[in-house]
Structures are given as C-alpha cells and as structure tokens.
Amino acid sequence: MKFASLGVVLAALSALAGPVRSSPGQASPQEIVARLEKNLRSLTSFQADFEQTSTSSSLSTPLRERGRLAVKKDDLMRWDYTAPEKKTFVFNAGLLQSYFPEDNQLWRQKVAPEDFESDIPAILTGKARLSERYDVEASPFPGSTPGSPQLRLTPKAEEDGSFILIEIDPAAWMIRRAVLFDWAGNKTEFVFSRFKANPRLEARFFEIKVPPDCEIIDGEPPRKK
C-alpha cells in the first residue's frame, strides 16, 4: 500500500445513519459498500479516536498505538498519535508533514496524487468506488460483533496478495474495524470509536505549529524500529 510506505497508514470511515431499506443480513456486499460510500460522501468532515496495532517480522511484539483522526473535504487529514509516542501527521494540499516532538523534527514531503488516492486514503475521502477498484466479498474474521457485516476488499489491479478486511457498524453505518495486509504478510489493524460527524474544522487546524528551534527536513522520514 503506497501511502503506508510514507509512514502513515490511513484508515477510518464515519457516516450518519439514515433509514436502511434492507438489513445487513439481506444486503449483498456490493449493496453494503454502496451504502457506506454514499454516507461517507455526504460528510464534510469527521473525527474519530483510533487504536492501531501493527504486526510485522521486524517487530518482536506488536506495536500498539492510539490517537485521534480528523478528515475534512477536500483532501485534508490530521493524525495525532498520543501514545506511546506523541507524533502528528498532516496531509494538506499535496504536502505530507510528519512531526516528531521527541526528536524536535518536522519532515515534509510532496505526495503524488496517485499515492494519496490509492487504497485507504481514497476510501477516507469518499473518492474510491469500491466495487470498481476491489473484488468485494463477505468474509467473516475473528472478533466480530454479532450482526455486523464483515467484508474483504481485494485490489483488482494488483496480484501481490494485499487485501483489506473491514467491519461495519450497521446501526451507524461506519467502519468499526479495518485490517490491512500487505504483500509481505505485515498486518495493521485499526479500531475506531467516538466518531463525530461534520465537526467545524478551520483550515488552521490542518497546520502544525513547531518550536522555533525545530529542525525542518525535506524528504521521507526514516522508519523507526
């Protein structure tokens, strides 16, 4: 997943619920994702808490992190990680900024449109047409909540073994869990809570304020182990 390689794994969805014509058990996977996309596109902004668990061959134990996500149309995102390490990622007007307070460093890098509009970022902004981009199928996975649809999204354009699992809250029509698997077998899982639809977010919210002595570096930040 291209955007993950930039140091930010983006996954979250939220939507206001309206009357549902068919129950999740009766709806097809394509009907479920169509309803999800419709609700997401109706939002101008949203916020949510997230818990992130990353598992890979380079980690002796899973890395567990948490924080708060904010998204605003068009193409504005802010990820504030609060534990175990504070860090902030902001995407604004084609520029990704990564701030690490402990290192007193701000990394800046341009992001190509095709990278930002791939996989999870496209889902977040409502740009993805899931049934066009993915093979969508019902796919129960461990830890499900009774009555919650669970789907597997497999990219049609790639044959590298990557895929995404999502669980949807049928009462609010938002993503409760998202699990990303890449070609190497690495897994990143997000659990979302405390969604807030259409909060008022000023443009300055998607700016990072740093101390005067902060080191500003142009380029992609190195991955921390």
Image: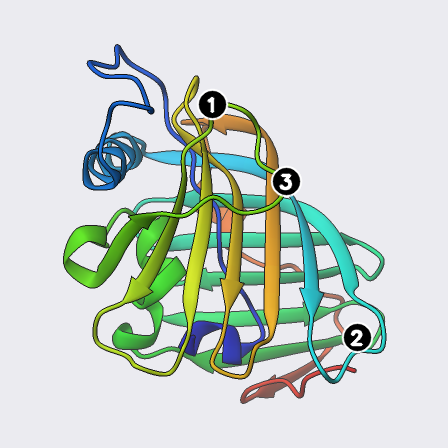
Which residue corresponds to the image point at 60% horizontal and 67% vertical from the top-left? 187
Q: Residue 147 has which mark?
A: 1
Identified by mark 2, the residue type is Asn
Placement of the C terminus among the 4 image quadrants = bottom right
The N terminus, quarter of image: bottom left
Q: Position of residue 43 (x, y in %)?
A: 31, 31
The residue where tag 3 is placed is 143
State if disc 2 and disc 3 touch (CB < 8 Å).
no
Label 1 – label 2 distance at C-alpha: 46 Å
Q: Amino acid at mark 1?
A: Gly
Left or right of 47? Residue 112 is: left
73 or 146: nearer the viewer: 146
Q: Secondary structure at mark 1?
A: loop
Snapshot quadrant of residue 46: top left
Scheme by which the image is coloured:
rainbow
Distance, label 3 to label 2, CA atoms, is 39 Å
The residue shown at (43%, 17%) is 171
Please give the name of the residue rendered at 28% of the width and 79% of the height, measured from the top-left corner.
Answer: 158
Across and down, in percent, residue 64 comes to 78, 58
Nearest to the eye among marks 1 and 2: give it.
Answer: 1
Q: Report the disc number at residue 104.
A: 2
Across and down, in percent, residue 21 comes to: 19, 13
C-alpha gap between disc 1 and disc 3 = 12 Å
| Horizontal side, residue 30 vs residue 62: left or right | left
